[in-house]
Amino acid sequence: MNATGQPVVMHGVNRQGTEYMCAQGRGIFDGPSDQASIDAIKSWRANAVRVPLNEDCWLGINGVPPEYGGAAYRQAIADYVGLLKGSGLYGILDLHWAAPGTTLANGPQPMPDADHSPAFWTDVATTFKGNDAVILELFNEPVPDSNQDTDAAWTCWRDGGTCPGVPYEAAGMQSLVNAIRATGATNVVAFGGVQYGGTLSRWRQYRPTDPQNALVAAWHTYNWTWCVSVSCYESNVGTVAADVPVIATEIGTDQCDAAWLTTLMDWLDARQIGYLAWAWQTFLASECSSVKLVLDYGGTPSQYGEIYRTHLAGLPRPFAAFTADVKITLGPLANHDRLDASGTFMLGAANDGIAPPAEPMTLAIGDLVTKLPAGSFHVDEQGRFMYESERLAVVLTPAGPDTFAYTMKLRNADLTATSNPVRITIAIGDDRGTTTANAGVTASGTVPAAARRFRDAPTRCA
């Protein structure tokens, strides 16, 4: 849930590169990390980006070049997360590559290491505490006990220590949750189950304790993994999702299999489980033998990426909830010099059955001030946002990603006046909206700086 009590369903991409470029001495990001590159991701209607991290690069240890590790790496990640938040996108930071002792983190490992992973999360949590648009994912694809779904695997997963199939002292999920909470960070914490994050069978039984009660189950699935059918989704994930928030932080197909991927996403959509596709990168060779989403960082989709982009484009569009002070003037009118309507309007729209904000509207017409009940808000069968009362009717029709056309009808005794459509462009990431109006209608609106926007402060996520 976000700060307004609405469920947050994440749809996004994995931005591959920050886990390996630094350790290989080739930079920090693989490809651009500027605003234009984020705008390209957002153009797919993504609201989240998963950023894989390298603990040696973050901590500046084990021979990582200083120009790409330590303070330089930390600042680059913080800057990128800042751009994401400023663009209205959630950031998921995951510990992707780790390694014990003096070994360079230059590839996947079966578990977090006790030598460095707790220190990594202490520092990451300290950096991003207070920024609840950042989710912390403890470790990418745990594989204790040689990729088995056993008591030993799940005990290692939670408690760490000396574990079968792990050739070093492991850090368990409980110790990493403890490290994060000890900093005072209240961020949502996510983590996948065993078997490369694909098995959630005993996630609830073994999950760590958390004083914030802000834990999310992460799940990974691809067309080549073991759980690829609806019946498996139901038994493996559905039982957990019944009472625990779940995010599929990696999904994908290397065969451009639209039927399989769409079936998976439809199943997740029906349960309001978010998902992020792997991966927003261009370097893999063939479009249908790899999981690259784009051909360039301007967002040109691969064949596989087009399946994903098209699906996101077809999802119901959530509208940001905000408060705007609006004044509409219609005139001149017969028998009246002008008719004013002004007041504070709480606007929003339904998404997957979520009701608009349950807030009253205050309307002033001349000297008459009326409190209008929240029950007058609704979304009709055509997806239009509607408000109706005895004296005012508002129809809001989406006219673009952040643009809505308002038609306002005012009724006062024997007079009925209907405005021409008023098009109001709302900068979701700013405190001001901008307006343009057709002839005969003037409109102005501002979004107060204190307003909490849709993307701010999640306390639970799905």
Image (cartoon, rainbow, N blue to C red):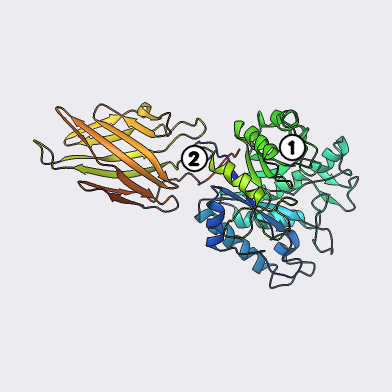
Q: Out of 312 and 270, give the one closest to the viewer.
A: 312
Q: Residue at x 24, y 43 (%)?
A: 328
Badge 1 marks a residue whose secondary structure is loop
Residue that carries the numbered disc 2 in the rendered image:
317
Q: Position of residue 56 (x, y in %)?
A: 75, 62
For residue 12, say whether it is visible.
Answer: no
SS type, badge 2 = loop
Residue name at image x 79 percent, y 51 percent: 112
Give the residue displayed 62% in from the left and 65% down from the top.
76
Relative vertical location of residue 253 with respect to residue 360 in this rendering, above or below: below
Does residue 21 appear left or right of residue 322 in this picture?
A: right
For marks 1 and 2 on the same chain, the one whose residue lies earlier in the sequence: 1
Residue 259, placed above or below residue 141 = above
Mark 1 belongs to which amino acid?
A: Arg
Horizontal and vertical percent position of residue 66 = 71, 72
Q: Nearer the viewer, mark 1 or mark 2?
A: 2
Mark 1 neighbour class, 10 Å CA radius: few under 14, some 14 to 19, many 20 or more: some
Mark 2 surroundings: few (<14), some (14-19) or many (≥20) residues within 10 A: some
| Quadrant for the C terminus in the image | top right
Q: Which mark is residue 207?
A: 1
In the picture, measured across the screen, residue 204 lies left or right of residue 48, that is right
Is residue 16 at all visible to an observer of this figure?
yes
Question: As shown in the figure, which amino acid type bears the numbered disc 2?
Answer: Arg
Picture quadrant of residue 244: top right
Residue 234 location in percent, x, y? 71, 28
x and y, in percent, of residue 281 in the image: 67, 57
Q: Are marks 1 and 2 in contact (CB under 8 Å)?
A: no
